[in-house]
Image (cartoon, helix red, strand yellow):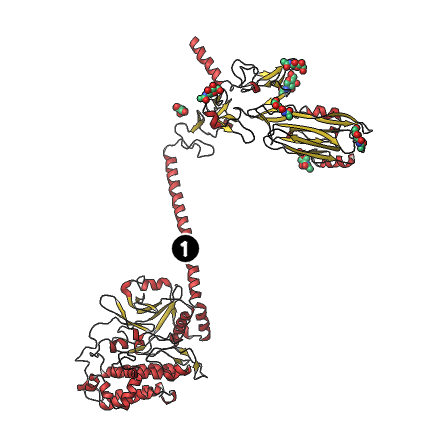
Amino acid sequence: MFLKFLICFSWLAFASPALETKPGCQETCGNITIPYPFGMGDECSISPWYNINCNTSYNPPTPFISTSNLQVVKISQTEVRVSNWLAVSCYATSGNLITNIPAHINLSTTPFTFSDTRNKFTVVGCDTLALIKGAGDISYTSGCVSLCDTLETLQSETLQANKSCSGLGCCQTSIPKGLKMFSTQVGSLDNYTKISSFDNCGYAFLAEHEKYTFEVSDFLYTNFLNKAKNVPVVLDWAIGEDQTCEEAQSNVTTFACMDNSECYDLDNSPGYRCRCLNGYGGNAYLSNGCQDINECEDPNNNPCEGICNNTLGGYNCFCPHGKHGDGRRDGSGCTSNNKEFPILNVTLGIGFGFLFLLVGISWLYFSINKRKLIQLKEKFFQQNGGLLLKQQMASHEGSVESSKIFTTEELELATNNYADDRILGKGGYGTVYKGILPDRRIVAIKKSKIVDESQIEQFINEFVILTQVNHRNVVKLFGCCLETEVPLLVYEYVSNGNLYEHIHRTRGNYSISWENSLRIAAETAGALAYLHSAAATPVIHRDVKSANILLNDNFTAKVADFGASRLVPLDQTKVSTLVQGTLGYLDPEYFQSSQLTEKSDVYSFGVVLVELLTGEKPFCLKRSDLERNLASYFIVSLKENRLFKLLESQMMNEGQMEQVVAYSELAKRCLSLKGDKRPTMKEVEMELERLRKFETHQGDILRREESMPLLSEPSDLYSVGGSSYTVNGSGQYSMDILSTAFTPR
Ligand SMILES: *[C@@H]1O[C@H](CO)[C@@H](O)[C@H](O)[C@H]1NC(C)=O
Ligand SMILES: *[C@@H]1O[C@H](CO)[C@@H](O)[C@H](O)[C@H]1NC(C)=O
Ligand SMILES: *[C@@H]1O[C@H](CO)[C@@H](O)[C@H](O)[C@H]1NC(C)=O
Ligand SMILES: *[C@@H]1O[C@H](CO)[C@@H](O)[C@H](O)[C@H]1NC(C)=O
Ligand SMILES: *[C@@H]1O[C@H](CO)[C@@H](O)[C@H](O)[C@H]1NC(C)=O
Ligand SMILES: *[C@@H]1O[C@H](CO)[C@@H](O)[C@H](O)[C@H]1NC(C)=O
Ligand SMILES: *[C@@H]1O[C@H](CO)[C@@H](O)[C@H](O)[C@H]1NC(C)=O
């Protein structure tokens, strides 16, 4: 029974409000609570400056700070409020000074500091000026002046300003951090003679500014004294002399912060203070002063919806048996006592949540990516001359429409994403890939390498010209794609390489029969004649050469590479251009005059004719200076009747002598230095056709293509721009320098 009582008692003691005062010490003076480290008597306070002198000769008893005359109004965990000290001066209507009381507070050796946030230096009066002077550690002088002429303006102004100290009849100024001592005195300009009807006194004081609101009635001395009693000055207190937390913590016997508390430094004075840890409340300076706060006692102190279990320094929320959730009002709370359902719901909810999140994120990701891609494609389209193309389309309406503008995806699919095994050839201009379109058409896709303005123009040029041309001996253009960084052209696939390679690849093992040579020449001439006259707008190829004549499996010629070609307006026969062409094929007249005519193509074609006849390269450094250029070499040989020495031995064998002579004569005419003397392409074509018929009327004995293979090995040749490349069996390629484009600038 007794034990039970004891337990009960101790529990009561434990649960009692947190201790404020040291056990065994008086808690209050009058009705003011004195918390530790303050206390009445040396035993009850932490140090002499915290020893509160409770003077019982007052009623109620009144506390003072130690031996000073500072009357304590309130003590909190961080501040102590003391009654303030007024400076006053009053004048008679005559202007004579009646009262003049200066004010002075000296806290230099105390642990107290004037709070710079709560206090303001305040001056009240209408002919009043006052200075505040700090001395000691902080030496400073400040002050303010308040002058007003009539009561009326003052009243309306103060009414409007809600009686606060706004500058009219009352002024305020802040004080610096760390102020420990000040003195002040009130002065006047006119000894209150001009305003004696409503104001005879001025006041200056340092006080808690939130507690003072100015009123006009404050000019009356008695009124003001009554009011000022309740306006304290706020002092920040600190313990530990000048020690910081770190310094103080090292000496456990003197360190003031007790169990479950923490130490903190102050920003406006030396020394430190203590406070209880989170979740604890009470007096941090007393052992067992910081007590656990039972958050569960007051529903306002915890967010628990279910059961609240207090812990030391905190609390836990949980749900009663059969309910689920985190037990918090701000969380999932406690739901349903059915065990299966919530789990299912939560699982489903989380599952669907994730699904939606996933879908949302992917959608966002893809749409952002798609937008970026579209913008990029748009950029490339413009950069690659899409606008130029549109213009061209507008000026040649109708014709371009038959060609297609391919999308990047279509071409990536067709070339197996530009796989290496799809490369037909590489060159200075870029790479040609073999592609298979969804409709099973095999195409060649030319991918330019470098993108600069001039090449884009060439590219568009080729595109526009090819879309206007429809001839069985001109390589067919299916379309293009401008959405990639480099523009792409899609051609008909011509399987058997180019003429240059067939003539020159295997020296001494000439693989094209005379009959085929004649046919290829005739077909090429036909294509060029068509370009010169029959196409919608005459086209000058400008780069006629054997490397630009592609061959298919039946050795049908296909004229290719219109990058340098020119459309000639119908009313013009000459166009001035930058000279462009390939060394060995270049028309000397055009080279000198820059005047481009159809006859330039005729000259170049003449070189191809000689190439076919002789199997010699159009330009060869191995030959002597005079003979280096095949055209002049041929002309000179003809003149000196050395033609047959020049001819391919096979030609001698199988070609009819008359045919060869006529053919040579035609080539010679094509190679005339003067363009006027050259035949037109149409004439060349007709002459070649005549020679072919003549040949086919001859006996079959001279034919050789049945007995000899046309090619000594399978070919993977392709023309890329002005350069020819051989892709050999190992997939490597070599370059033939002499056939690269020669462009004098
Ligand atoms: C203190 O006690 C006096 C009289 O005993 C009373 O007038 C005053 O209101 C009390 N102050 C407080 C803050 O309780
Ligand atoms: C208490 O106040 C009275 C009047 O101001 C003073 O005479 C007396 O000395 C004070 N007592 C103490 C203990 O300070
Ligand atoms: C104000 O009063 C002081 C002292 O009483 C006197 O010396 C001074 O002349 C007076 N000034 C005016 C403007 O009356
Ligand atoms: C302030 O008080 C300290 C100690 O009490 C004293 O040494 C100092 O001279 C005082 N200063 C003034 C300006 O009174
Ligand atoms: C004056 O104070 C009242 C109440 O405190 C407030 O509603 C009003 O807006 C204030 N007027 C001015 C001018 O500050
Ligand atoms: C701690 O402070 C006490 C009192 O000032 C002093 O006697 C003691 O030597 C100090 N201890 C240490 C370790 O500084
Ligand atoms: C409450 O929490 C304490 C630990 O802080 C634990 O020992 C006790 O079992 C908990 N009470 C319940 C009912 O969960």
Residue type for callout 1: Asn
Which of the two residues, 178 or 227, is positioned nearer the viewer here? 178
Give the answer, above or below, for where 705 lies relative to 272. below
Label 1, on which residue?
369
Give the answer, above or below, for where 7 lies relative to 660. above
Residue 572 position, x and y percent, is: 45, 83
Residue 684 position, x and y percent, is: 32, 87
Residue 153 position, x and y percent, is: 76, 37
Residue count near mark 1 (Cα–Cα under 10 Å), binned few <14, some 14–19, many ≥20:
few
- Toward which corner of the image does residue 316 lie, by quadrant? top left
Give the answer, above or below, for where 720 lies relative to 86. below
**Hey, which residue is sitting farthest top in the picture?**
2
Tell me the residue at 23%/85% (across/down): 647
Residue 576 position, x and y percent, is: 44, 80
Is 263 placed left or right of 128 in the picture? left
Does the image show residue 1? no
